[in-house]
Image: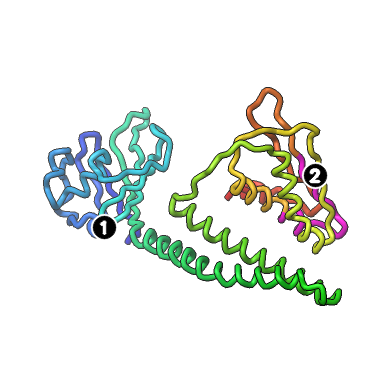
Amino acid sequence: ELSDAVIAYDENFNVLIFNKTAERVFGVSVETAAGVTLGLELASDAKLKRLVQVVFPSLAPTVIARSEQGAYPQVADIQFDDALLRVTTNRIVDEGGKTQGFTKVIRDRTREAEILKSKSEFITVAAHQLRTPLTAVGWVFQGLKKDATLNADSKMLVETGDLAAEKLLQIVNDLLDIAKMEGGKFGYEFQTGNLVAFLDSVIQGAKPLAKQYNIELFFDAPSEPIPLDFDAQKLGVAVSNLIDNAVKYNVPNGTVTLAARQMPDKPYALVTVKDTGVGVPPEALNKLFT
């Protein structure tokens, strides 16, 4: 038995195919569905209502398009009070390319959506629980750094611990950002600022990591400021991740160069991160943004 429900109907909306999984998803037997002519008026029939709403999505409570309008296959998520269905619609065409009907493959994503929601909730709770003690640990190391009685070895241990606590706190904050993204709450707060000064602060923050990996950082900055509207927190995450990767996947005594340029006659700037590291294999390039 197929794990997905499959239904097919002709250009007059006469049901041609209705598999066993469709029986479970729609609560309609094959015998009932076979030969039925689907129409808007059947939406008032409690037994056929959900099936009609899938065939005519404009009747459904909530529809989220996952494909370009007019292009086939059409993919959409249809949200009901008690279910989430991923519906893929394709045309049945004859040899001349004329549409003879449609097929719909319906995947019940209700359980999957519940698991994803539970995962996001767990990440959020765990991250919040971790952030409080990590902040306290950071304060302890900050206090120890001010202790003038520490010898050189102790100071190095404190510096290492402070850096590790700061990195852990950043990972926790990243987890919270992921949960916000999945919940659709990862908004932006744009403010006007000097991009050059902002990038300089980012690269200054990366210097302890570069020192740890014996990598030299350079900032190829323009002589003039670059005034732009940007979200400093979100852009900081993006640029820091690029610099972190450039440092960690470099060679000993390697270099990382951050550069910024105002694009001529354009309302935006180009920011690049170059390194002397191993690079990305050609076969992995298509996965960079996944």
Please state the extent of the stretch shown in magenta in the rendering. 244-259
Amino acid type, mark 2: Phe
In the displayed structure image, the side of residue 171 where residue 212 appears, left or right? right
Amino acid type, mark 1: Asp
Q: Are marks 2 and 1 in contact (CB under 8 Å)?
A: no
Q: Within the magenta stretch, is there residue 247? A: yes
Helix, strand or loop for disc 1: loop
The residue carrying mark 2 is 219
In the rendered image, residue 30, in percent from the top left (x then y), is placed at: 19, 54
In the rendered image, residue 109, in percent from the top left (x then y), is placed at: 36, 57
Disc 1 packing (10 Å; few <14; some 14–19; many ≥20): few
Residue drawn at x 63%, y 66% is 168
Q: In which quarter of the image is the N terminus?
A: bottom left
Disc 2 packing (10 Å; few <14; some 14–19; many ≥20): some
In the displayed structure image, the side of residue 22 where residue 260 appears, left or right? right
For marks 2 and 1, give the one nearer the viewer: 2
In the rendered image, residue 88, in percent from the top left (x then y), is placed at: 36, 45
Image-quadrant location for residue 67: top left
Residue drawn at x 40%, y 37% is 72
How many numbered marks have been drawn onto this rendered protein structure?
Answer: 2
In the rendered image, residue 183, in percent from the top left (x then y), is placed at: 43, 54
Image height of 135 relative to 261, above or below: below
Image-quadrant location for residue 5: bottom left
Q: Nearer the viewer, residue 150 or 100?
A: 150
The residue carrying mark 1 is 82
Mark 2 and mark 1 lie on one chain; the one further toward the N terminus is 1
Q: Nearer the viewer, residue 60 or 246?
A: 246
Residue drawn at x 71%, y 48% is 282
Residue drawn at x 80%, y 56% is 250
**Which numbered tag is attached to residue 19?**
none
Q: Within the magenta stretch, is there residue 121? A: no
